[in-house]
Amino acid sequence: MGKINNDISDIKNLSGNFTPAIEGYYSRLWKSYDMIIHRHSKVEIMYVLEGECRIPFQNMAAAILKKGMFIIINSNIYHGLFVDENFPCKMMNIEFAFKASGSSNLLMSQLTKAYPNIIQVFSRIGEYEIFKDTFGVSDALKTIIMAKKNDENDYYINTCMAQLFIMLGRISENENKSENNYVKNAEKFISMNYDSEIKVADIAKHLNINESYFYKIFKKAKGITPIEYLTNFRIELARNLLCNTDLSQSEICDYIGMGSRQYFSYVFKKSEGCSPTDYRKKARISFYF
């Protein structure tokens, strides 16, 4: 059948008889630990039950996990595990790979057809992805680990893995809804505060979320950065004011939150291809003719 690609972001391509097979697992308390950077061909899930840990990566910033958080690390990604002796960490871990199956096990192709949100959550995982547990993932992992310890049959373990994947898909759905709400509230904040000096940190603080997380979800949703969105919003207002009022450019600058007339003129010309003065002239000529 050929070699199976364990890259979890390519799971949508697993249309044959494939099932996830557990190849490693543990549940333990680390009082102090420093695992060297390594990689393997399996997908890994680490879940923090108590305390915190750090997951260092090669050529990437380390990930910090705290209670109720878990990380999915893709296959062949260099990573480690560090637990500070002052902050013990109780955690669970499973490692799995996709195996060809000719049995009656529930296949990934069947599962992803019934629950397409599983494809959505897995396809977004590049090197790794961090999640907060909102659907009882900890219980699903405990069941899987206990099943392996008790040497349960493959069908039962496969069913437990299917339940885990369904939970992951639902977490992703909920996160998407939350992200949409954050973006809508950010747009509302900008529409009410465009005349003030606004930074990405100000919007994130208003939403009570991490600044880098807000930047990421906003750009994913809108295709532009928050500051680019703010600039476009201000330029749209400026166009309307140039066309429909006799306000001077200095007054328009103050109104839209761009204090510098020189900067306003530069940004406007970059956006519209002409200066604010020429734009007003063209608009009024069009109005009369």
Image (spheres, rainbow, N blue to C red):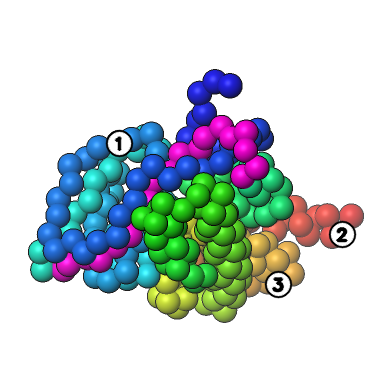
Q: Is residue 32 visible?
A: yes
Residue 70 drawn at (x, y percent): 38, 60
Number of callouts in the render? 3
Nearer the N terminus, badge 2 or badge 1?
A: 1
- Determine which of the numbered discs, if any, sits on residue 84 in the image: none
Q: Position of residue 68 (x, y in %)?
A: 37, 70
Figure quadrant of residue 52 = bottom left
Rendered location of residue 135, percent (x, y)? 52, 70
- Secondary structure of the residue carrying tag 1 is loop
Which portion, as a residue range, is magenta? Answer: 87-105
Q: Which mark is residue 39?
A: 1
- Label 3 element class: loop
Q: Nearer the viewer, mark 2 or mark 1?
A: 1
**Horizontal side of residue 24 vs 37, given as left or right:** right
**Circle 3 Cα neighbour tier, 10 Å, few/some/many (<14 / 14–19 / ≥20):** few
Quadrant containing the N terminus is top right
In the rendered structure, are the residues bearing label 2 and label 1 in contact, judged by CB atoms less than 8 Å apart? no
Residue tagged 2: 288
The residue depicted at 59 percent of the width and 72 percent of the height is 181
Residue drawn at point x = 46 percent, y = 39 percent = 97
Q: Real-space Cα distance between discs 2 and 1?
A: 70 Å
Q: Secondary structure at mark 2?
A: helix
Q: Where is residue 72 drawn, in percent x and y?
A: 41, 51
Q: Is residue 50 above or below residue 273?
A: below
Residue under label 3, please give it.
245
The residue that appears at 38% across and 34% down in the rendered structure is 41
The residues tagged by marks 3 and 2 sit, at their Cα atoms, a distance apart of 15 Å
Find out whether the residues at labels 1 and 3 contact each other: C-beta distance under 8 Å: no
**Disc 2 residue crowd, few under 14, some 14–19, many 20+, Cα 10 Å:** few
Q: Is residue 252 visible?
A: no
- Please identify the quadrant where the C terminus is shown: bottom right
